[in-house]
Image (spheres, grey):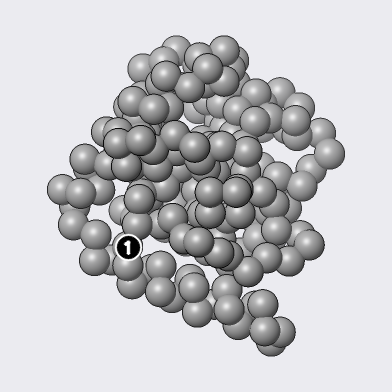
Amino acid sequence: MNSIAEEKKRLRQAMLARLAQLPADDRDAESKVINSFLAALPVFQTAKMVAAFAPLRSEPDVLSTLFAAGKSLCFPVIDGHSMTFHEVSDPGEFVKGPFGVRAPNPRCHPVVSPDSIDLILVPGLAFTRDGRRLGRGGGFYDRYLGKEQLSATRVGLCFHAQQVGEIPTEAFDARIENLITGEPSGEE
C-alpha cells in the first residue's frame, strides 16, 4: 500500500470514529442548517435533475428538502464496481442496497444519463474548503464524477466535524465545486 493510501486509510478511521461520537441531536441540528443552505443555493433552485444520496446515519439528511422541492431526483445504485443513478419520485421507493445504503430498485426505476444531471450532491467522510473529498474507499463517486458526460455542479454536504485542513489526494480523486456544512455560516 502506498503512503497516500495509508494516509487515507488512517484519516477514514479517524473520521469514522469522530462521526460515531457526534450526538444525534447535533446531527439533526446540523442537517437542518444544511437543508436551509441547500434550499437557498441558486444552482439547486434552477436545477431540473438533482442527483442525491439517501443518507447513512453519519451523513446529513436532506431528503425532506429534496422531495419537497418538486425536482426530478435520482439516487445511486451500486453494481459491482460501478455506480449509476436512477430516478425516484418518492422516498418510500428505496430498497436496501449494497453496504446497507438505501437505493432505488434498478429494475423499477429508470437510469438517468450523466448528461441529464444538473446538480450532484456528494457525500464523503471528510472535505476541505478547497474542494478535496475523502470518500469511504470504494471509489464509486470518484469514477462517476470523472465521467466526461457529467457537467453537473458538484456540491459536497457534510457536518462541521467532517471539515479538515488537508486530505491526501491522488490523480483520480475528484473534487467538488461547493461545500455546504452544518455550521451556521456553512456554505462555502
Instruction: Inspect this view and state whether residue 106 appears.
Output: no
Q: Please name the residue shown 63% across and 69% down the image.
A: 168
Question: Where 56 falls versus 70 (above or below)?
Answer: below
Q: Position of residue 68 (x, y in %)?
A: 36, 17
Q: Please name the residue shown 40% across and 42% down the image.
A: 181
Q: In this view, does 114 lie to the left or right of 54?
A: right
Q: Where is residue 122 in the image (x, y as percent from the top left)?
A: 54, 43
Q: Please name the residue shown 31% across and 53% down the image.
A: 57
Q: Position of residue 81 (x, y in %)?
A: 69, 60
Question: Where 40 falls versus 187 (above or below)?
Answer: above
Q: Is residue 83 left or right of residue 163?
A: right
- On the image, numbered disc 1 is attached to which residue? 19
Location of residue 186 (image quadrant): top left
Q: Residue furthest bottom?
A: 1
Q: Please name the residue shown 55% across and 64% down the image.
A: 166
Q: Position of residue 99 (x, y in %)?
A: 47, 61
Location of residue 46 (image quadrant): top right
In this figure, what is the number of numbered marks? Answer: 1
